[in-house]
């Protein structure tokens, strides 16, 4: 759906995270050495934080030669990196291009020291286990304070990470009984995740001529029970085409839990089915519910509520948006609004302009007839 779900890099049997110098400049390096004939990796200069891709081979003598930002499909013409692994686990060698030669010295990386706020971060603590490389980078970044804003009666403080330009807010005031410290930590973790996605996207784009990642966040709805934020991203992370999408943040403000649509609205029999997009648990059952129950129901209901917008009984050309195709209502971005639950269709690439129309709001009166498994206060 919509926004890329980059997540953590895939686990490898032999992935090393190293720190040291290239010339006199501090760098952090990640190398995946599972296949000696196809070593991959990335590194960043501590001063700049942006990744440079590495690709190369480890020969039988233990010499590792690698190119930088190798374009897909191109032969490796230059391999400026030459490294040798030492008995103590360190690496040493040179970076050479034209008439310039710089020494490289690398040792196994250590977990960076985190300040008190960072230590409270669930996301940063998960990186300590899953991606030390990303943790080292994020620990060296900071959010800068921006404007304050009042939205639906609550005061917000905006923050921006300067390198990625990723912005999000924290709450300065909120509903009575809401633990703002907990809620703000959830939002801060969301911002860190988007910063990680930015760097991963730019790395992918670097091997296809350059990446792009631009994000716009917009508060959509707050009340004493829930909050929604639109997170709309336009991105090019490599591949054939750029893309875009909205991946909204929908939270239960009393627990900080990220709400799924089935938490809020359920049309099936029995208890709602929840799909974990990290473990793929319940995917078959979830997919069947969305395709056989949810999508046909939404299409039928919207056809009655918005017949003109849905194109009911209207002649169609191949250029028209086919909202009568239930497939486009299966896996949908959604969020709370004052008008109702906003649910956008999701189209294949050639019809992406049909997404995010200004009319598909599911009234809360209807949502309350089909509650999910979390008790929420809705308008």
Image: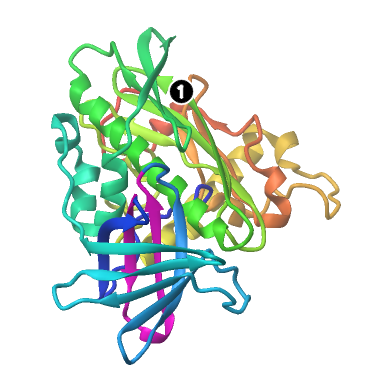
Residue 197, percent from left and from top: 43, 48
Horizontal arrangement in the rendering, residue 104 relative to residue 57 (left or right)? left
- Outermost residue on the bottom side: it is 60
Task: Report whether residue 216 is seen.
Answer: yes
Residue 276 point in image, percent of width and height? 31, 56
Q: 83 above or below 213?
A: below
Q: Secondary structure at mark 1?
A: strand
Q: Quadrant of the C terminus?
A: top left
Q: Which residue is mark 1?
A: 219
As rendered, which of 136 and 8 lies closer to the eye? 136
Residue under the point 39% across and 53% down: 44
Question: Which residue is located at x 29 percent, y 39 percent?
Answer: 140
As displayed, is residue 203 above or below residue 112?
A: below
Can you say whether 107 is above or below 267 in the image?
below
Residue 325 pos. (x, y %):
66, 54
Q: Is residue 29 above or below residue 340?
A: below
Give coordinates of residue 69: x percent, y percent. Answer: 53, 63
Q: Is residue 34 magenta?
A: yes
Name the quadrant containing residue 187.
top left
The secondary structure that dominates the magenta segment is: strand
> Toward the viewer: 236 or 281?
236
Crowding near the residue tagged with mark 1, few <14, some 14–19, many ≥20 C-alpha atoms within 10 Å = some
Q: Residue at x 63, y 32 (%)?
A: 305
The residue segment tinted magenta is: 25-46
Residue 83 counted in the magenta span: no
């Amino acid at each position: 759906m919509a926004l890329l779900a980059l997540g953590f890099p895939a686990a490898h049997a032999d992935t090393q995270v190293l720190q040291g110098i290239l010339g006199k400049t501090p760098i952090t390096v990640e190398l995946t050495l599972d296949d000696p004939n196809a070593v991959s990796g990335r590194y960043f200069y501590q001063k700049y934080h942006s990744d440079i891709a590495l690709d190369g081979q480890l020969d039988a003598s233990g010499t590792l030669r690698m190119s930088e930002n190798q374009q897909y499909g191109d032969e490796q013409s230059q391999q400026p990196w030459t490294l040798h692994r030492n008995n103590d686990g360190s690496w040493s060698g040179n970076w050479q291009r034209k008439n310039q030669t710089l020494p490289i010295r690398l040792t196994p990386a250590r977990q960076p020291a985190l300040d008190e706020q960072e230590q409270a971060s669930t996301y940063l603590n998960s990186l300590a286990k899953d991606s030390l490389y990303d943790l080292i980078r994020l620990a060296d970044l900071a959010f800068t304070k921006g404007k304050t804003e009042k939205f639906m009666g609550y005061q917000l403080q905006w923050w921006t990470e300067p390198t990625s330009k990723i912005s999000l807010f924290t709450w300065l005031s909120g509903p009575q009984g809401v633990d703002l410290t907990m809620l703000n930590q959830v939002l801060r973790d969301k911002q860190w995740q988007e910063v990680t996605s930015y760097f991963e996207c730019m790395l992918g784009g670097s091997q296809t001529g350059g990446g792009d990642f631009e994000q716009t966040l917009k508060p959509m709805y707050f009340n004493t029970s829930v909050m929604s934020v639109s997170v709309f991203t336009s991105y090019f992370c490599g591949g054939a085409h750029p893309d875009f999408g909205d991946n909204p943040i929908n939270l239960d403000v009393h627990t900080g839990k990220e709400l799924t649509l089935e938490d809020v609205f359920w049309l099936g029999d029995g208890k709602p089915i929840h799909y974990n997009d990290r473990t793929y648990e319940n995917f078959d059952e979830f997919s069947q519910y969305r395709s056989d129950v949810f999508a046909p129901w939404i299409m039928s209901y919207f056809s009655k509520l918005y017949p003109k917008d849905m194109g009911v009984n209207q002649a169609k050309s191949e250029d028209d948006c086919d909202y009568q195709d239930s497939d486009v209502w299966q896996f949908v971005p959604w969020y709370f609004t004052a008008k109702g639950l906003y649910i956008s269709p999701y189209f294949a690439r050639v019809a992406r302009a049909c997404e995010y129309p200004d009319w598909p709001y599911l009234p809360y009166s209807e949502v309350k007839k089909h509650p999910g498994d979390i008790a929420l206060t809705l308008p």
